[in-house]
Every structure is written in C-alpha cells, then in structure tokens.
C-alpha cells in the first residue's frame, strides 16, 4: 500500500513539474511578445526593461530544468544508452543556447547599446530557435519525465 502511494505521489509530482514548465514556456512567450511590441513601438527603455525581466525569468527556468529535469532523467535512464544519448544531446545543446542567449540579453539590455536591425535579426533567430526548442522539449523530454 505504501509503495502504491509513493508511486502515485511521484507521478503527481512529475506531472505538476512538467505542467509548471509548460506554464513557464507560455510566460516566456508572453514576455517575448512584450519585448517585440516595445521595440516595434520604439519604446526602447521599456524594451530594455523587458529584456532584463526576460533574462531573470529564463535563467530561473534554465536552472530549474537543470536541477530537476535533467538530473532526474539522467538518473532514471542511466541504463538506457539510446535515451541517455537523447537526454545528453538536449542538455548539451541547451548549454550552448543558454550561453548565447545570456550574452545577447546582457549586451542588448545595456543602456548604451542601440536596438537596431542587428538586434531584430538576432532576436528573431533566438525566438525561432526557442519556439522549436519548446515544442521539442514538451513533445520529447517531458514525456520521458512523466514515465
């Protein structure tokens, strides 16, 4: 009886964590929309504030995924080579994204840096990548976590 309770409890925790991550994703998309709107309305100060808020939010999300999701997956699937390869590839690519994204956010949130065509091009590329990444995470990694 106790083992059944613990298994159900673990499943509830797993589902609620993936639901939290999905909510984080929606919030991040909303923040991206706010940044895009501020830039399109030429409200540069507001755009820089939104970039700073976005940085804090995405850093928190990255840290929680590292601590809770990747740790769990690597321990749970340690004996499954193919699944581990997938998990490690996700984790490795996320580290590159984190580094590049944080560099971008640090640079463009500075008051002395102009938001121009280069910003637009880089930001569009980041947004495109993040949207694909979110979809892939939710359809691949999160399904592994619920098991």
Image (cartoon, grey):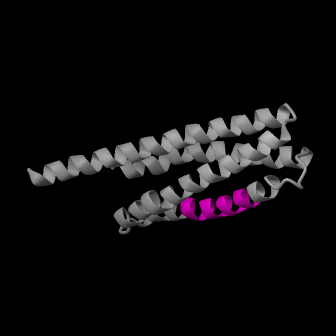
Taking the image as shown, residue 88 lies to the left or right of residue 36, namely left
Taking the image as shown, residue 16 lies to the left or right of residue 128, namely left
Q: Kindly identify the residue that appears in the image at 69 percent across and 40 percent down.
A: 32
Residue 91 is a magenta residue: yes
Counting from the top left corner in percent of width and height, residue 26 is at: 57, 37
> Which quadrant of the figure has residue 117?
top right
- The magenta stretch is 89-103
Comparing 21 with 45, the one in front is 45
- Residue 23 vs 85, above or below: the answer is above
Residue 56 is a magenta residue: no
Q: Kindly identify the residue that appears in the image at 85 percent across and 48 percent down.
A: 119
Taking the image as shown, residue 115 lies to the left or right of residue 27, namely right
Comparing 83 with 91, the one in front is 91
Counting from the top left corner in percent of width and height, residue 79 is at: 35, 68
Counting from the top left corner in percent of width and height, residue 111 is at: 85, 53
Q: Kindly identify the residue that appears in the image at 87 percent across and 35 percent down.
A: 42
């Amino acid at each position: 009886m106790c083992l059944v309770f613990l298994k159900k409890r673990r499943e509830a925790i797993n589902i609620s964590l993936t639901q939290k991550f999905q909510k984080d994703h929606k919030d991040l998309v909303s923040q991206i929309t706010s940044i895009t709107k501020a830039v399109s309305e030429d409200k540069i100060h507001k755009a820089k504030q939104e970039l700073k808020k976005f940085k804090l939010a995405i850093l928190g999300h990255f840290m929680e995924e590292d601590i809770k999701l990747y740790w769990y997956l690597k321990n749970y699937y340690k004996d499954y080579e193919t699944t581990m390869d997938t998990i490690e590839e996700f984790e490795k690519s996320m580290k590159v994204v984190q580094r590049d994204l944080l560099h971008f956010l640090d640079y463009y949130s500075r008051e002395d840096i102009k938001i121009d065509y280069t910003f637009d091009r880089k930001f569009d590329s980041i947004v495109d990548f993040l949207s694909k990444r979110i979809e892939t995470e939710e359809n691949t990694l999160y399904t592994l976590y619920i098991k």
